[in-house]
Image (cartoon, helix red, strand yellow):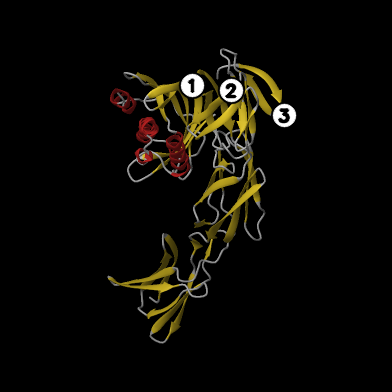
Amino acid sequence: MRGSLAALAGGVMLAAAPVLGAQALTVPKTVDAGSSFSIESSGSGQATLYIVGLGGVVQREVQTGSPISIPEGTLFNAGHYIAYLSTAPNDVASFDMVPAKVADVSFLARPSRLPVGLRNGITGAVYLFDAYKNLVTKPIAVNFDISTPNTAPENRSVQTKNGSAWVALDSSPKEGAAHFVAKAGGVSVVRVIQQVPGDPCAIKMSAKPDGKSIALETEPVRDCSGNAIPDGTVVTFTQNYRGGQTTVDVPLKRGVAKVEMPAVPGANITVASGVVLGNEIHWGK
Amino acid sequence: MLKPVLVGIMALSASAAVVGAQVSVHVTPPNLDGPRNLADQTANAVVKNYIESWESLRAALAANRPELLDRDFVGAAKQKLTETIQQQAKAGIQTTYKDRSHDVQIVFYSPEGLSVELVDDVEYDVQVSSKGKTMAAQPVHSRYVVVMTPTEVRWRVRVLQAE
């Protein structure tokens, strides 16, 4: 930026452009996005003021020699701007518009559903924006908070770098909906993460004779954190006998799986769900 | 003009300087803040698409044609640049943003892989003209913060902001 730092007044840093011609401009060095500001001009007479940047263009008929007021909300996109008068186009001044305070937290939490007890299984990433969709790039503390009913909440504070921050957290040992909150600059955003039971930790079945059949029933199937595996999860019973095999898939109902299979003396019966293998029963001789 | 630069970028490994006819692009090795690994192929694509976005930006602002932004910009960046072009047209001016050099570094790859953030130390000349006549010009040296997101076939600029 051309010009030297001249003063710091009222939160606006002023830079004075050297007077090269009759109508030099003195612009603030930085301006908060969307706020009003004033441009000093020397000389006298009518001119057109141009403020030009990637974030916007202002064209205004002005009276030089008196302060030129740019009202609040005229320019609001952060970035670099140049300013000049039509009567002195070689006398170009420039300033930077900086983001205003945080007004929006763009928060992406993943995944929306995951098993309990997964280390660093939940990630959250935020970008901070002001009310004008400018990325707030100065470092700001973001508080990440995740809580599941009946478990202690987990908190983490992370400083943004270049407007972004992220965190990785463990899923809770208890199933349920976790409220994952990202808070920065007084703005909070909540995402809900469904934490579901993991794979069964162990499957144990028992067998009882029932006429010419065997009644097989599992104990309530739970994951390694003690959460009940959801009803509908398929449990597979397999009976091997004299070179033959019978397989029955049964969905869990009220946490247990039940089935009747033909009683074949000497048969080996196993139970499994997914990759988890339960106990084995040898029937008869 | 850009072709030698882009070819150079595609061949970049960790750090290199590539000088084209008019645009010099230096890529500093990524300094990632994030849990996700960034494959070289992804990094190269991000930088290549970002440098190409300046070409679109330059063409769109020089001709006051916002549709030229479509390939490379999306979301807030596209909306803001479109509005700027409309304001330029209303004021009867065009601007030329002639980038001379870029020093690009990827600084963040989001955990879910849906955004990449990079910073770019850019030197460019901005020139304002009206009816073919230059009204004002100034060399600019700024640090840009850029957020890019993947779309069907390329990374597009979602945030483009000078500090």
Q: Nearer the viewer, residue A192 or B7?
A: B7
Which numbered disc flags the more N-terminal residue, 3 or 2?
3
User: Mark 3 highlights which residue?
Assistant: A10
Q: Is residue A3 above or below residue A244?
A: above
Q: In front: mark 1 or mark 2?
A: 2
- Where residue A239 appears, as percent x and y from the top left, is 36, 72
Q: Give the residue type that dot 1 points to.
A: Val
Q: Secondary structure at mark 3?
A: loop
Q: Nearer the viewer, residue A85 or A281?
A: A85
Q: Can the viewer see residue B50 in this picture?
A: no
User: Mark 1 highlights which residue?
Assistant: B140
Q: Give the residue type that dot 3 points to.
A: Gly
Q: Is residue A45 above or below residue B63?
A: above
User: Mark 2 highlights which residue?
Assistant: A45
Residue A159 — which label? Answer: none
Q: Residue furthest front?
A: A45
* Label 2 Cα crowd, 10 Å radius (few <14 / some 14-19 / many 20+): few
